[in-house]
Image (tube, grey):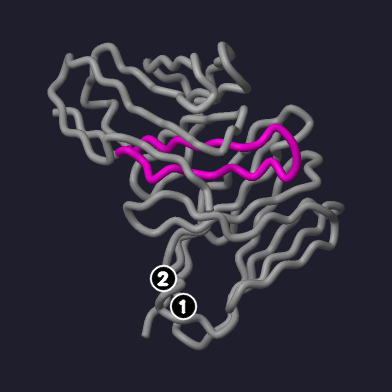
């Protein structure tokens, strides 16, 4: 059974700082998805990582995937307040699997 | 940009009422999903469908039911709403093949009094 964990669950950081969110999953999955959710809103797709070693960047966010380690990271560079949100990773989607979401990392960027 | 719609966006209703949450997508996706999410918490898959006349229960047991008569439409029904049903309900859809990415609707925030 596929399980997805995220670390940390809560993150408070100052503007301008760098930090990494980790996403581990329990069984084979060759793809990983990152979503952002603002309070009271729906999920917005950030990154789709489809192979081992995949790296994608958008603005101050960079995501990577290591399928051998069953690990994905979401790196935040020089955080700004607008990045405050909850970030979810999800694995699965193929081989007949449904998505399994992690518990989410609630990020708060303080001025 | 994903085109997936949910109505109503907000609903406050009394205990015992029957409600239907609507979800429609214009992308021709075969797969559709319903998730339940309490504020700031995890998403729980409650129903999914892989095509017309196909529906399955998800990981979280739910008293709701779904139907899939048309590809674009995946409504969720609660026959008798209870306060424990208060939550946000998110509908999503995805293509049959690569990259299997799910696109989410704006959600319905349900409050049962």
- Give the labeled residue for mark 1: A13
Magenta includes B20?
Answer: no
Spatial CA distance of label 1 from label 2 is: 6 Å
In this rendering, position of residue B38 left or right of residue B16 = right
- Nearer-N-terminus badge (1/2): 1
Q: Which residue is mark 2?
A: A108
| Disc 1: CA contacts within 10 A as few (<14), some (14-19) or many (>=20) | some
Q: Relative to B53, is A67 above or below?
A: below
Label 1 lies in what chain?
A
Camera sees residue A19: no
> Residue B51 at what x, y percent from top left?
61, 20
Q: Dot 1 lies on which element?
A: strand
**Residue closest to the eye, A14 or B94:** B94
Name the foreground residue: B21 vs B3. B3
Q: Chain of mark 2?
A: A
Q: Are marks 1 and 2 on the same chain?
A: yes
Circles 1 and 2: CB distance less than 8 Å? yes
Identify whether A17 is placed above or below B27: below
Q: Position of residue A23 (x, y in %)?
A: 65, 55
Which span is picked out in magenta? B88-108
Give A86 or B72, whichever is nearer the viewer: B72
- Which residue is found at the position 59% from the left and 42% from the top? B102
Disc number at residue A47? none
Image quarter in which the C terminus of chain A is found: bottom left
Question: Would you identify the image quadrant in which residue B103 lies?
Answer: top right
**Measured from the top left, where is residue A14 in percent x and y?**
45, 83
Residue B84 visible? The answer is yes
Residue B97 is one of the magenta-drawn residues:
yes
- Residue at the spot 31% in from the left edge and 35% down from the top edge: B7
Residue located at (46% from left, 62% from top):
A10
Q: Is residue B24 left or right of residue A71?
A: left
């Amino acid at each position: 059974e596929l399980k997805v964990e995220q670390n940390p669950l809560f993150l408070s950081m100052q503007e301008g700082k760098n930090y990494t969110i980790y996403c581990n999953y329990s069984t084979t999955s060759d793809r990983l998805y990152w979503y952002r959710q603002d309070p009271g809103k729906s999920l917005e797709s950030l990154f789709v990582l489809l192979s081992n070693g995949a790296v994608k960047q958008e603005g101050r966010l960079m995501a990577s995937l290591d399928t051998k380690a069953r690990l994905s990271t979401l790196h935040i560079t020089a955080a700004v307040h607008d990045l405050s949100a909850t970030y979810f990773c999800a694995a699965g989607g193929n081989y007949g699997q449904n998505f399994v979401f992690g518990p989410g990392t609630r990020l708060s960027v303080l001025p | 940009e994903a085109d997936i719609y949910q109505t109503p966006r907000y609903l406050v209703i009394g205990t015992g009422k029957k409600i239907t949450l609507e979800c429609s997508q214009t992308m021709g996706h075969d797969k559709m999903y319903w998730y339940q999410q309490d504020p700031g918490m995890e998403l729980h898959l409650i129903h999914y469908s892989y095509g017309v006349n196909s529906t399955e229960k998800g990981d979280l047991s739910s008293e709701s039911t779904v139907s899939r008569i048309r590809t674009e439409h995946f409504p969720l029904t609660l026959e008798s709403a209870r306060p424990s049903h208060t939550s946000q309900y998110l509908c999503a859809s995805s293509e049959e093949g690569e990259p299997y990415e799910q696109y989410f609707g704006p959600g319905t925030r349900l409050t049962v009094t």
